């Protein structure tokens, strides 16, 4: 998939998905089956012998590495993540949900910074996994109608473009966050298709923040 799809083309794909007849049960069922198979394809791509390129896989690898290797930068980021999670909890208890969410996001970025401190090429590896997964899913779909899946793939194309731009600008944390978001959407593709999430990003981020808690 070319990662330079214009916003106009992406918008047309989303519009086509939204204009599908919601009463067509067989069409919806068939696309859910395709989405489940596409999800398995993505999971197989993301899985690696040393832990995987998913959010959970990177975090597990950080913890395993720190059991035997000292990395003060990564440890400092993990300490900051714990502090931000504590602040998020206190804000939530005080009823300030917006502040709690801000602290949770800060904690998540701290965790990503810890990953990059140990694995500097994590953004590139994760982006490559997304590209491979999308290419295999597109090959699997062929010319079969799957407007909702294709709309999500178009959105992931946009995320990948933004991730590459962030990486080129030297912002590895944002690049990794966007690439992990793409993988998380693919990891839960069937649910995103079935429940027609309007904000795929927010759903994926919430799931990943739970992993880092």
Image (cartoon, rainbow, N blue to C red):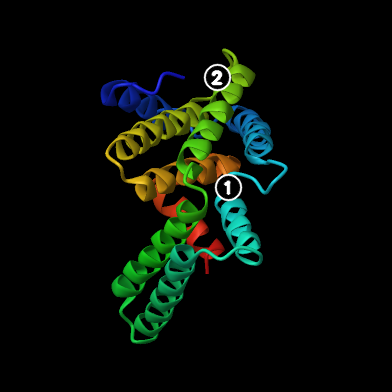
Residue at x 49%, y 41% (from the top left corner): 121
Name the residue beneath numbered marker 1. 54
Q: Earlier in the sequence, mark 2 or mark 1?
A: 1
Question: Which residue is at the front of the view, 72 or 139?
Answer: 72
**Image side of residue 52 versus residue 166, left or right:** right
Q: Position of residue 88 (x, y in %)?
A: 39, 77
Name the residue beneath numbered marker 2. 145
Residue at x 44%, y 64% (from the top left corner): 73
* Mark 1 Cα shell of 10 Å, populated few (<14), some (14-19), many (≥20): many
- Is residue 43 visible in the rendered structure shown here? yes
Q: Position of residue 169 (x, y in %)?
A: 27, 39
Question: Which residue is at the front of the view, 45 or 93?
Answer: 45
Question: Which residue is at the front of the view, 28 or 82?
Answer: 82
Farthest residue to the top: give it.
Answer: 143
**Image side of residue 161 versus residue 188, left or right:** left
Mark 1 secondary-structure assignment: loop
- Is residue 200 visible in the rendered structure shown here? no
- Where, by quadrant of the figure, is residue 137 drawn? top right
Residue at x 57%, y 46% (from the top left corner): 191
Question: Which residue is at the front of the view, 52 or 31?
Answer: 52
- Where, by quadrant of the figure, is residue 113 drawn? bottom left
Q: Position of residue 25 (x, y in %)?
A: 60, 33
Q: CA distance from mark 2 to mark 1?
A: 28 Å
């Amino acid at each position: 998939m070319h990662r330079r799809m214009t916003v106009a083309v992406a918008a047309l794909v989303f519009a086509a998905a939204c204009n599908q007849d919601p009463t067509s049960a067989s069409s919806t069922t068939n696309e859910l089956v395709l989405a489940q198979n596409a999800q398995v394809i993505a999971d197989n791509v993301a899985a690696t012998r040393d832990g995987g390129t998913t959010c959970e896989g990177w975090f597990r690898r950080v913890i395993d590495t720190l059991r035997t290797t000292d990395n003060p930068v990564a440890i400092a980021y993990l300490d900051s993540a714990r502090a931000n999670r504590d602040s998020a909890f206190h804000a939530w208890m005080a009823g300030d949900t917006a502040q709690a969410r801000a602290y949770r996001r800060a904690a998540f970025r701290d965790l990503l910074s810890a990953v990059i401190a140990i694995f500097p090429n994590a953004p590139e590896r994760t982006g490559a996994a997304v590209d491979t997964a999308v290419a295999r899913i597109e090959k699997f779909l062929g010319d079969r109608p799957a407007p909702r899946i294709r709309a999500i793939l178009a959105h992931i194309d946009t995320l990948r473009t933004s991730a590459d731009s962030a990486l080129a600008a030297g912002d590895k944390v944002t690049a990794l966050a966007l690439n992990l978001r793409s993988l998380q959407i693919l990891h839960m593709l069937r649910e995103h298709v079935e429940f027609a999430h309007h904000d795929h990003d927010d759903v994926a981020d919430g799931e990943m923040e739970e992993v880092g808690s």
